[in-house]
Image (cartoon, helix red, strand yellow):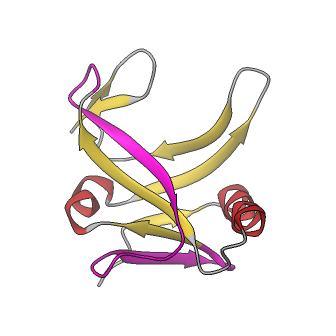
Amino acid sequence: MSTVIEISDGAAARIRALAAEKGTPGGGLRLGVKGGGCSGLSYHVDWAGEPARLDQVVERDGARVFVDPKSARFLAGTVVDWQQTLMQTGFVFRNPNVKSSCGCGDSFTI
C-alpha cells in the first residue's frame, strides 16, 4: 500500500511527545476527513492508543499517524506539520488535493 501522507520533523516530535504524555507508546495521531464545515469537508484529528483494523499506519522516527481507508483518498500526498507561532499552535495539513478552503482554514473542497 502506498503512503498516504508524510510527517514532518516538527510533527513527528510533537506526536512522540503526545505518546509520552498519554502513556501510549503504540499510539498515534488519528487523522481523518469528515463532511462538514463551511467548505464541505473538514479534518478530524484525535488520539488513538492503537490503529483500527483497516487503518493505514504511517510512521516516522517512532511517531505514528493512523488514517482510515475512506479518508485516505482525500489525504493522498498531504504533509502533516506542527506549527507554533504567536498566532497559532497546532498541526497543519498541506494537502495538494484541496481546491479551495474557507477563511478559517478548517474546512476545504476537493
Out of 91 and 26, give the one closest to the viewer.
26
Tell me what residue is drawn at x 35 percent, y 19 percent.
102
Q: Quadrant of residue 86?
A: top right
Q: Magenta stretch?
A: 37-63
Q: Is residue 14 magenta?
A: no
In this rendering, would 81 be left or right of 48?
Answer: right
Apparent side of residue 61 relative to residue 32 in the rendered image (left or right): right
Figure disc tally? 0
Residue 76, given in percent of the width and then of the height, sits at 31, 60
* Residue 109 to residue 81: above or below: above
- Name the residue at 55% across, 42% down: 92
Q: Nearer the viewer, residue 44 or 78?
A: 44
Determine whether, in the image, residue 104 is placed left or right of residue 54: right
Quarter of the image with the N terminus in it: bottom left
Query: Is 67 displayed left or right of 46 in the figure?
Result: left
Residue 30, by quadrant, is: bottom left
The quadrant of the rendering that contains the C terminus is top left
| Residue 51 painted magenta | yes
Of 15 and 110, which appears nearest the observer?
15
Q: Residue furthest top?
A: 103
Q: Quadrant of residue 37?
A: top left
Give above or below for 9 relative to 35.
below
Residue shown at 49% from the left, 45% from the top: 93
Residue 71's spot in the image, x, y percent?
A: 26, 57
